[in-house]
Image (tube, rainbow, N blue to C red):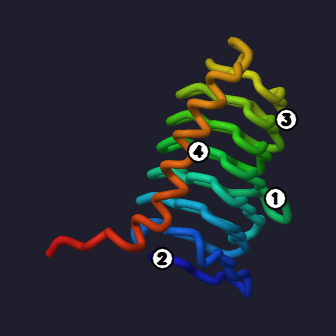
């Protein structure tokens, strides 16, 4: 795995986390608890700070960055879908950011909110808790119901289980 200190800024990664060997983590990145970081993900705290909380899945090819001296904060049990981009934003607990979506500068995605696939959450936009947004720019579509929460709680368990499963069962095929 590619984990780098940069100008004295060192990543702090929980021993419970799993970072795929093909992921890249640079600088002031703090990963707590069981966080799964997939192949091709780039988490770059070279001049900003990135904080990723317990139970979060950073799927394949996700890019996370922050502006100089600023912070990107990813809450607990968040799902960051394949190839999404998070830049100087705050993502609330249990939120889902869909594949190929972008959440950009100073935006906030509330707890249990969902950013649909290919959506754009613009600078300083606020996605209210338990709201599904989609489109470019992202607009509210509907509210998150209890059935959705139960379904996604089960999905999120798959990724936290990957932390141990990948450590034990991932073998490089020669």
Q: Is residue 15 left or right of residue 1?
A: right
Q: Helix, strand, or loop for circle 4? A: strand
Q: Nearer the viewer, mark 4 or mark 2?
A: 4
* Sooner in the amino-acid sequence: mark 1 or mark 2: 2
Q: Is residue 124 left or right of residue 104?
A: right
The Cα atoms of the two marked residues, 1 and 2, are separated by 21 Å
Q: Helix, strand, or loop for circle 3? A: loop
Q: Is 94 drawn above or below residue 160 in the view shown?
A: above
Q: Mark 3 = which residue?
A: 124
* Sooner in the amino-acid sequence: mark 3 or mark 4: 4
Q: Is residue 130 visible?
A: yes
Q: Mark 1 = which residue?
A: 71
- Name the residue: 44% across, 76% down: 1
* Sooner in the amino-acid sequence: mark 4 or mark 1: 1
Picture coordinates of residue 16, whole percent (x, y): 59, 72
* Sooner in the amino-acid sequence: mark 4 or mark 2: 2
Q: Is 54 drawn above or below residue 9 in the view shown?
A: above
* Sooner in the amino-acid sequence: mark 3 or mark 2: 2
Q: Helix, strand, or loop for circle 1? A: strand
- Name the residue: 72% across, 59% down: 53
- Name the residue: 48% across, 43% down: 82
């Amino acid at each position: 795995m590619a984990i780098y200190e940069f100008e004295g800024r060192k990543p702090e990664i929980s021993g419970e986390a799993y970072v795929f060997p093909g992921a890249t983590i640079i600088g002031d990145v703090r990963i707590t608890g069981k966080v799964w970081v997939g192949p091709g993900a780039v988490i770059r705290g070279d001049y900003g700070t990135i904080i990723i909380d317990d139970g979060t899945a950073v799927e394949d090819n996700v890019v996370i960055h922050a502006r100089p001296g600023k912070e990107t904060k990813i809450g607990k049990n968040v799902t960051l879908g394949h190839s999404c981009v998070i830049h100087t934003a705050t993502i609330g607990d249990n939120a889902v950011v869909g594949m190929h979506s972008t959440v950009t500068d100073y935006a906030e995605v509330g707890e249990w909110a969902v950013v649909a696939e290919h959506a754009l959450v613009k600078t300083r936009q606020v996605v209210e808790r338990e709201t599904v947004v989609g489109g470019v720019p992202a607009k509210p579509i509907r509210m998150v119901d209890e059935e959705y929460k139960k379904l996604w709680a089960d999905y999120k368990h798959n990724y936290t289980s990957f932390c141990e499963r990948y450590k034990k069962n991932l073998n490089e095929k020669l």
